Amino acid sequence: MTIIPSYQGKSPDNSPSRPDKVAQAKDEKSVLDDPQTVSVTESKARKRSLVLSAQETPADNRSDNALRPQTLSEYVGQSRIKAMMQMSIVAAKGRNESLDHVLFYGPPGLGKTTLAKVIANEMGANIHMASGPSLERPRDIIGLVHQLEKHDVLFIDEIHRLSRVAEELLYPAIEDFVIDLTSGKGQATRTMRLPLPRFTLVGATTKAGMISNALRDRFGFVCRLEFYNQEELCAIVARTTKILNVKAEEKAVQVIASRARGTPRIANRLVRLVRDYGQYQGKDVIDEGTAIAALESYQVDTSGLDSTDRRFLEILIDNYNGGPVGVETIAATLGEDRDTLEDVYEPFLIQNGFIHRTPRGRMATAKAYQHLKRKAPNMQLNLDLAVDPLEEKW
Ligand SMILES: Nc1ncnc2c1ncn2[C@@H]1O[C@H](COP(=O)(O)OP(=O)(O)OP(=O)(O)O)[C@@H](O)[C@H]1O
Ligand SMILES: [Mg+2]
């Protein structure tokens, strides 16, 4: 596997694993507490408790290698995408061809990077990893594609942040497997076309709407990752407890899964936190009561909402009678910027039916009233104004 050095965010941790779980627990705590160690990509989610942030923390990154599924059969959920990938990989291998280019999009922590690595494993190919912002100049792209071998996977994370120059250089590379090298200036400009081996570009983004149509149209597969359901999350939590050598009763697994916000990354983090809590309490086996007490001590409520989510709902219900309220108004009242609200908080609240996005602003649903134990008004009017919460960007 090749890691491009300029890629700051998610290089794998090659440090030896630490057998001492208490030391690890301390380590995780200090990482959560120390703002210096929190990467820039996480700064957006700073105001959300790091326990429930879907963004990757350094502690997640450390346990990633052990927890990441390596094959399609280990990868839980996303069955539609998995079936499509399975079929196409078998077909591509049968024809001795590279897999068509794939774009994965969806909220953080749902398994886009994991799928890219799974694809490379299933193809028996190398994966070369880079991120959009690190590919600024032509030589960044040239250096990257230069290392590719036949059928390799080139993974570009945050692909919506590619510079225009980089994007245009990539077009012939992904379409015709050639790259144009330019030298000289003015009349002395020369272009040389170099062939590239057939490779698969896997792009990932949390912001589908920010990818140009020209780039999007060059992907053979465009796949949207969905939040995971309770059954899938239970399978992920059970798998993680097994890998981490944590004994947990089935009821405890269900509790952790139900508060993981439909997100494997959060599910894995909650398992680690519950494990540390159980260890501190001297429990050999995590039972339902221990899991609940642990998660409550981290202020994770029964639906996986944290204090900022609840404040969001309180603003809607208590200050604005359930809405509709403009997103800018909510952002100002919460002290957040609009982007953070839309990218970090809203997807889960909308997906889980706590709020509706309407043409006139956000509205609290009957479920939100119930969750905050407020008396709900007649919700018929609200529903009339509602639009499809899954509102496709394309
Ligand atoms: N389908 C799955 N089955 C089991 N574990 C999963 C699955 N998807 C993701 N995970 C776990 O969740 C973690 C986060 O996944 P991943 O890094 O692939 O998310 P992502 O979508 O790339 O997030 P981001 O948008 O922040 O880059 C992984 O370390 C992996 O252990
Ligand atoms: Mg990723």
Image (tube, rainbow, N blue to C red):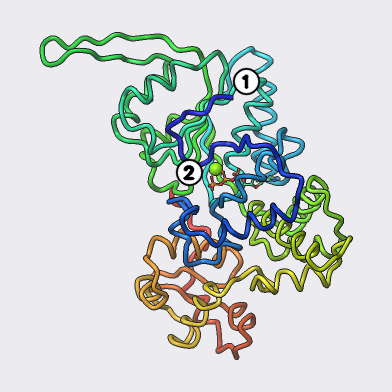
As rendered, which of 129 and 375 lies closer to the eye? 129
Q: From the image, tell me which residue sits under label 1.
A: 125
Instruction: Give the left or right position of residue 79, taking residue 196 as reference.
Output: right
As rendered, which of 275 and 357 lies closer to the eye? 275
Q: Position of residue 107 (x, y in %)?
A: 53, 52
The residue at 50%/65% (across/down) is 346
Q: Residues within 10 Å of mark 1 (few under 14, many from 20)?
A: some
The residue at 39%/35% (across/down) is 134
The residue at 36%/33% (across/down) is 214
Mark 1 and 2 residues: CB-CB less than 8 Å, in contact?
A: no
As rendered, which of 202 and 275 lies closer to the eye? 275
> Picture quarter containing residue 339?
bottom left
Q: Position of residue 258 (x, y in %)?
A: 72, 64
Q: Amino acid at mark 2?
A: Thr
> Picture quarter containing residue 194?
top left
Instruction: Give the left or right position of residue 76, taking residue 283 as reference.
Output: left
Q: Amino acid at mark 1?
A: Ala
Q: For numbered disc 2, what is the local secondary structure?
A: strand
Inter-mark Cα distance, 1 to 2: 22 Å
Residue 237, placed above or below residue 180:
below
Q: For numbered disc 1, what is the local secondary structure?
A: loop
Quarter containing the N terminus: top right
> Picture quarter containing residue 174?
top left
Asked whether residue 100 appears in the rendered view, the answer is no
Q: From the image, tell me which residue sits under label 2.
A: 205
Instruction: Give the left or right position of residue 176, taking residue 263 as reference.
Output: left
Q: Position of residue 115 (x, y in %)?
A: 62, 37
Q: Position of residue 260 (x, y in %)?
A: 67, 61
